[in-house]
Image (cartoon, rainbow, N blue to C red):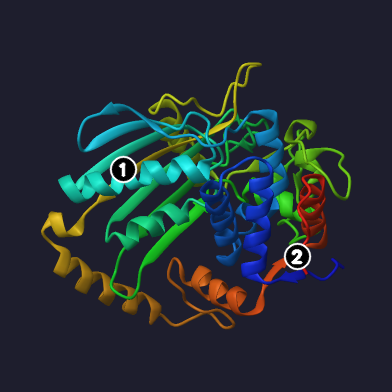
């Protein structure tokens, strides 16, 4: 049986994480952005993209893989479309800059397409869909990870894809919808959480080189200690795509759109010069410019209500995209953020090494 979670007050946890990134050299604004984004993932129940990432982010920053204080550069500007280079800055810095550009252009033109390349790990993609929703915009996001080969395509055991997230945000009055998932059966961060004593993986989440299915994080990481870094290059297996050929096909398209089209590169083949970075191709649509905003809101809300009125399977609840995250956020803000003991120990060890005092 897994040890009980450590409950940490959300505000104190956010302040602690921000202090860690200030200690590694980020300015106040950047440290706060990174902390807010990672904590936000935990609050939404996406622990794989939350504060469990802190030790890895710090390692990447110290190694020079991710750079502090970067400003994304617009390298192609066509008005309603643009290509942005993140210059390997922290994803929580350069991705919001790209999103803000897309929102501004969609407000101006009614639609915008923005490509982002060479960004540090951008974290939970649904956060950017929620940002667009607050601007009353529909958004669609295709994401890849250049240089990160973790997922086997349908029918294979070799790694070929990144976890390739996909997200859609739909603004409806009082009922926004946020669809957000990795095209892998589980995100790599969920394997990380499981390796730290967190929620176990499904027994078919991973695949061994001989084709056997596995739920053991060692399949991806090889041997590792109870506390410390995980190295995906040490494992011999791969994560599986979700939904068999359908998820595999969507992952393929994420690599094409977010990786090849943006010029940031696809997941592989990996060479000695390959640098891990996120790419994202985002579409923003303004319902008010489209000319059907009133109909969209009325029809959309009516459809959501009709879907949710479906007779549930015994023991289940019919939910819309984003409902689970909203409920988890309310609970964790009220009762604290649960962290696995090994995850918490890893964060504390990183903080102590940087001279950051642990909160009560």
Q: Is residue 113 above or below residue 285?
A: above
Secondary structure found at label 1: helix
Q: Position of residue 193 (x, y in %)?
A: 73, 54
Relative to 212, is 48 on the left or the right?
left
Mark 1 or mark 2, earlier in chain = 1
Q: Which residue is mark 2?
A: 359
Q: Is residue 56 visible?
A: yes
Q: Which residue is mark 1?
A: 101
Q: Position of residue 165 (x, y in %)?
A: 50, 46
Residue at image location 56% in from the left, 41% down from the top: 121
Quick one: 310 or 59, which is closer to the camera?
59
| Spatial CA span between label 1 and label 2 | 37 Å
Secondary structure at numbered mark 2: loop
The image shows residue 256 at horizontal and vertical percentages of: 42, 30
Q: Residues within 10 Å of mark 2 (few under 14, many from 20)?
A: few
x 62%, y 21%: residue: 270
Tell me the quarter of the picture where residue 136 sits.
bottom left
* Nearer the observer, 272 or 39: 39
- Whether residue 205 is visible: no
Looking at the image, is mark 1 or mark 2 nearer the viewer?
2
Give x and y (percent) for residue 189.
Answer: 66, 49
**Quadrant of the image containing the N terminus:** bottom right
């Amino acid at each position: 049986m897994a040890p009980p979670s450590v409950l940490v007050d959300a505000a104190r946890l956010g302040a602690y994480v921000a202090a860690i990134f200030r200690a590694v050299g980020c300015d106040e604004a950047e440290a706060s952005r990174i902390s807010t984004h990672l904590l936000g993932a935990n609050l939404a129940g996406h622990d794989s993209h939350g504060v469990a990432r802190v030790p890895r982010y710090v390692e990447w920053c110290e190694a020079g893989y991710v750079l502090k204080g970067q400003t994304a550069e617009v390298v192609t500007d066509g008005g309603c479309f643009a290509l942005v280079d993140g210059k390997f800055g922290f994803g929580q810095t350069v991705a919001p800059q790209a999103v803000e550009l897309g929102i501004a252009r969609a407000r101006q033109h009614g639609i915008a397409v923005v490509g982002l390349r060479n960004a540090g790990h951008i974290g939970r993609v649904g956060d950017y869909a929620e940002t667009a929703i607050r601007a009353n915009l529909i958004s669609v996001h295709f994401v890849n990870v250049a240089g990160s080969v973790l997922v086997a395509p349908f029918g294979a055991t070799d790694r070929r894809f990144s976890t390739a997230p996909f997200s859609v945000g739909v603004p409806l009055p009082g009922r926004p919808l946020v669809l957000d998932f990795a095209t892998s059966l589980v995100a790599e961060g969920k394997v990380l959480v499981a390796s730290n004593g967190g929620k176990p993986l499904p027994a078919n989440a991973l695949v061994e080189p001989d084709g056997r299915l596995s739920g053991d994080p060692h399949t991806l990481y090889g041997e590792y200690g109870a506390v410390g870094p995980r190295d995906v290059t040490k494992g011999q297996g791969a994560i599986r795509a979700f939904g068999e050929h359908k998820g595999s096909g969507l992952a393929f398209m994420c690599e094409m759109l977010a990786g090849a089209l943006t010029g940031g590169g696809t997941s592989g083949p990996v060479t000695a010069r390959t640098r891990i970075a996120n790419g994202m191709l985002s579409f923003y649509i303004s319902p008010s410019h489209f000319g059907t905003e009133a109909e969209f809101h009325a029809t959309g809300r009516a459809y959501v209500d009709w879907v949710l009125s479906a007779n549930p399977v015994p023991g289940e609840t019919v939910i819309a995209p984003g409902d689970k995250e909203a409920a988890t956020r309310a609970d964790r803000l009220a009762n604290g953020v649960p962290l696995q003991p090994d995850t918490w120990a890893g964060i504390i060890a990183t903080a102590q090494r940087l001279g950051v005092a642990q909160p009560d």
